[in-house]
Image: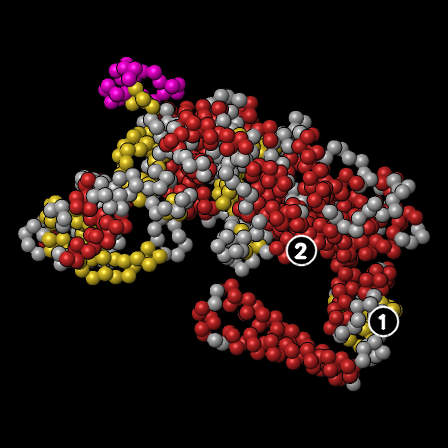
Amino acid sequence: METKGYNPEQTEKNWYQWWESQGFFAPQKGATGEPYCIVIPPPNVTGSLHMGHGLNNTLQDILIRYHRMKGDKALWVPGMDHAGIATQYVVEREIKKDGSDRHKLGREKFVERVWEWVETSGGMILNQLRKLGCSCDWSHQRFTLDRGLSRAVREVFVKLWEDGLLYRGKRLINWCPRCHTALSDLEVSLPKDPKKGNLWHLRYPLKEGGHITVATTRPETMLGDTAVAVNPEDQRYTNLIGKMAILPFLNREIPIIADEHVDQNFGTGALKITPAHDFDDFAIGERHKLEMINIFDMNAFINESGGPFKGMDRYKAREKVIEELDAMGLLGPIEDYPLRVGRCYRCRTEVEPWLSDQWFVKAKPLADDAARAVREGRTKIVPQNWEKNYFEWMDNIRDWCVSRQIWWGHRIPAWYCDKCGGITVSREDATKCSKCGSGEIHQDTDVLDTWFSSALWPFSTLGWPDETPDLGTFYPTSVLVTAFDILFFWVARMMMMGIHFMKDVPFREVYIHALVRDEYGEKMSKSKGNVIDPLVVIDKYGADAFRFTLAAFAAQGRDIKLSESRIEGYRHFCNKIWQAAHGVALKDISGFNIETARKLPYSHEERWIRSRLGKTIAAMREAIESYRFNEAATAIYNFIWLEYCDWFIEMSKPSLYGDDKDAAAAVRRTLIDVLEAAMRLLHPIMPFLSEDLWQSLPVPKPTKSIMLAPYPDAKDFPFDKVAEEEMTIVMDVINALRNIRGENGIKPGARIPAVLITKDESFGHLLWGRHVHIEGLGKLSSLEIKVGGEPPQKAAASTVWGVDIHVPLEGVVDFAEEVKRLEKEKSRIGKQLEGVLKKLSNDEFIDKAPPDVVEKEREKKDELTQLAQSVEKHLDRMRAFL
């Protein structure tokens, strides 16, 4: 039984299962085009589909489906990241419910528990990607802890060690006192808004008498101070440079040094230098060869270096230090000072800069090569404005801390000798020290930063370190689609590793997409209650509507403002297409033969729609290949809804339902042929509906699925200048008639007379040849077309293309009633405009309202002003007719 509209739920599920069962997602053996490869930004194994995933993977799928249809050898590699800290945190939380913890279980048992969790609960997001319609080659699915990828990780670690690009040293890192691990910069969350803090002024006595006042936001770290620094140009302190200050509580002498990086305008211009607990201080400490004193243990409690404050946590120590300094008369003014304190991205504990023995990659040599590749155009970043951020980060890169003090992940392949203290780094598990030969060795307990293994993703997933056919065919990959927030932390590291180990860039292009925000431009968050769950809207409106919405708003460099109503709007678009197919193109087609109908000549309207299709094909190809997804979506939307449905279908009906069988067959032929090509055009964005309709069309098909059918070529639908120009004239005349109806309050169903007057006889012939369309679509009771002559009395008028269009209103419109209606409308618009003007004249509103709200009010003012002018004009005309 035929339903009244498109039902996506079962349709989408059935088609996806069929596609996957048929192996259509794998690179096609018969493909004659170029290799085209995308590696998915691997979601965390703990992850669930959110809006960022929805946008990112929709855009990737559009590209991969497009290139697959172009005949390219298209490979989309899916997979997941083991997400070291995130996954360990989830499993630790689970075992805590049983009254246990990882230390009670021991390393081996704990890792077993994590693997159990991964196998039973992890990877849920991959099935959610299927629901989205992602045509990944699931036979290529990878996991960053797969055996092959683990071998790649170890090979890279050892090779970096051999190349002198990897070392172990005591350096400053981000430390989470709760998770007990080092964190990458990306794993440190900085709040959007600063919190209220203080800037304390502390007086340090001078050895020779007097004191120097320093300003700090962290008085407790003074226990680890090893210098006071001033700017060498600061005249206030020139005479103190080289002298000694006495550190309160510990009575340690510390030098007053000069460093040009000291900001003279911050605080007092004198800084306490704590190299073990501040990144800027660490850099100053290295330059001046200062002692580095760690005052915290792994829980951020004061250790034995903190003298009388030993055993206190950092916040309690802060209170006591201030209290004691005040009692000693060494506490100066206290100012309010905004602070943005980093927190562990997983447990939200405030991160501590901490001096620790860690493994580091020498990033500068690798970063220089990666920056050069972009500068030389070997990898192109789109939009190009992101290149500036990329270069700034690469040119100012710090050595990369790659060790993590957790148990889930790639264990560092380094062994320490208990006899000689040597380090053995090995591709295979070591059994003896490489320096002294002793068997008394133990492996490093740390694991590698998750970003270390994901930095190898473009080549490790293709089989490296083996020389596999996939690696030879698909590396470098074609494009990476990603969000801007991991440009530095993941994209840059893939560039560094790919160039160093593969001697070529990992991808030819990087497309950076924007964020998905709510309809007001606010970032989605659970606390705000403005999160749109992609799985919920897919269930409600279908994956096609959701995908099309994301594509339609994915303009380069502009965040997407998403609302559920917009998704619902494109759900109506899906239904419009379905109804156009089943309600018109495929209705009553028994006995219809497309091959016979294709021999019939094309009418003016058929030539026009084919020409418009050709232009749409060219526009979509160019838009997709240049990552202007919104332009591609707009092009196909306008073609299907406005040109095919609203114009061509309506103009086809007289022939379709008339007595001339050849005319009916010809127009049905074009309805079907154009719809078939439009579905191939639409397929990368709306894969399910396009497949469903394409399969139902009575045309010969070269492939089993639309996803393997050729993407339309504009040369098959050549531009028809004459048909387009003539149709433009006819459509503009009809639109003018429709405008007259609306402007004069004529009821939608009422039939009206019209008189068209032209000075050009050829225009008269053209219009009369299309009189059936003008009468039908203009809803006319009569149509008179004249070359020259006087216009009718009391008529509304308009002019297009030199054609004067007149609609006699006497007997059609009650002029007195229309005057009353327009006066009410004028009053209503006036009140609205008055309210908007009042808002815009309020300085407080202009200063405090969000910029987009103010801009909307300004746009509203312009719209209401134009509307008021239009109503006034029509009111004058109606009064003249009385």
Q: Who's the residue at 29% across and 59% down the image?
A: 337
Dot 2 amino acid type = Gly
Q: Who's the residue at 16% across and 44% down the image?
A: 307
First in sequence: mark 1 vs mark 2:
2
Q: Is residue 105 above or below residue 49?
A: above
Mark 1, secondary structure of its residue:
strand
The mark found on residue 331 in the picture is: none
Real-space CA distance between mark 1 and mark 2, rounded to the nearest whole angstrom: 35 Å
Q: Is residue 295 left or right of residue 206?
A: right
**Front in this rendered view, residue 676 or 189:** 189
Q: Is residue 786 above or below residue 707?
A: below
Q: Who's the residue at 63% across and 36% down the image?
A: 135
- Specify the color scheme: secondary structure
Residue 741 at x, y = what percent?
77, 71
Q: Is-magenta flag for residue 431?
A: yes
Q: Who's the residue at 31% across and 33% down the image?
A: 358
| Quadrant of residue 669 within the rendered picture | top right
Residues drawn in magenta: 417-440
Q: Residue furthest front?
A: 99
* Residue that label 2 marks: 569
Q: Is residue 7 left or right of residue 535?
A: right
Q: Are marks 1 and 2 in contact (CB under 8 Å)?
A: no
The mark found on residue 753 in the picture is: 1
Residue 322 at x, y = what percent?
20, 55
